[in-house]
Amino acid sequence: MRKITLSNGETVEVECLSFALTSGVVEPDGGVVIETEHFYAHQDVAYPIIFILGWFQDMNGCIFGRSVESVRPVLLHAKNEMNDKENVEEVMEAINILTEELNK
């Protein structure tokens, strides 16, 4: 079992975070965005993803095309510097909008 701290500060102890999410043991902030027979989407539980996307836009995508590890600084910045109440509210609003649109 591994202890994992989520972006909301909650610590969970799970063997596999992906399994815990898809089986409902761990509930992502904002819930499931959409789930179909072949697709499952939720807010990233470790990083406030809406800000990552904005940061990528500011970078003009220049970090894409390198290894996956090249996005780690962006993820850590979002988790450590952009995880305040105001930003979390924006993330939750974005989740709600996306969930509504995808489930029409």
Image (tube, helix red, strand yellow):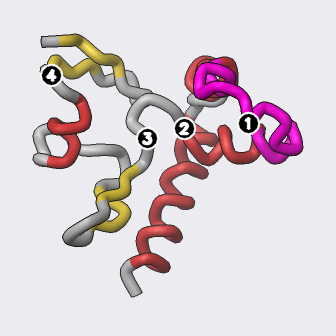
Return the mark for residue 5: none
Callout 2 touching callout 3 (CB < 8 Å): yes
Callout 2 touching callout 4 (CB < 8 Å): no
- In the picture, measured across the screen, residue 44 lies left or right of residue 32, that is right
Q: Position of residue 15 (x, y in %)?
A: 13, 21
Q: Would you say residue 44 sits in the magenta stretch?
A: no
Q: Position of residue 47 (x, y in %)?
A: 51, 32
Q: Position of residue 51 (x, y in %)?
A: 67, 41
**Residue 81, can we see it?**
no
* Residue for badge 1: 65
Question: Mark 3 or mark 1: which comes first in sequence?
Answer: 3
Three-letter amino acid code at the position of disc 1: Gly
Mark 2 residue element? loop
Taking the spot 43% from the left edge, 41% from the top edge, the residue there is: 44
Question: Mark 1 or mark 2: which comes first in sequence?
Answer: 2
Taking the spot 19% from the left edge, 48% from the top edge, the residue there is: 22
Taking the spot 52% from the left edge, 70% from the top edge, the residue there is: 97
* Residue for badge 2: 48
Q: Residues within 10 Å of mark 4 (few under 14, many from 20)?
A: some
The Cα–Cα distance between marks 3 and 1, rounded to whole angstroms, is 21 Å
* Residue for badge 3: 44
Three-letter amino acid code at the position of disc 2: Pro
Three-letter amino acid code at the position of disc 3: Asp
Image quadrant assignment for residue 85: top right
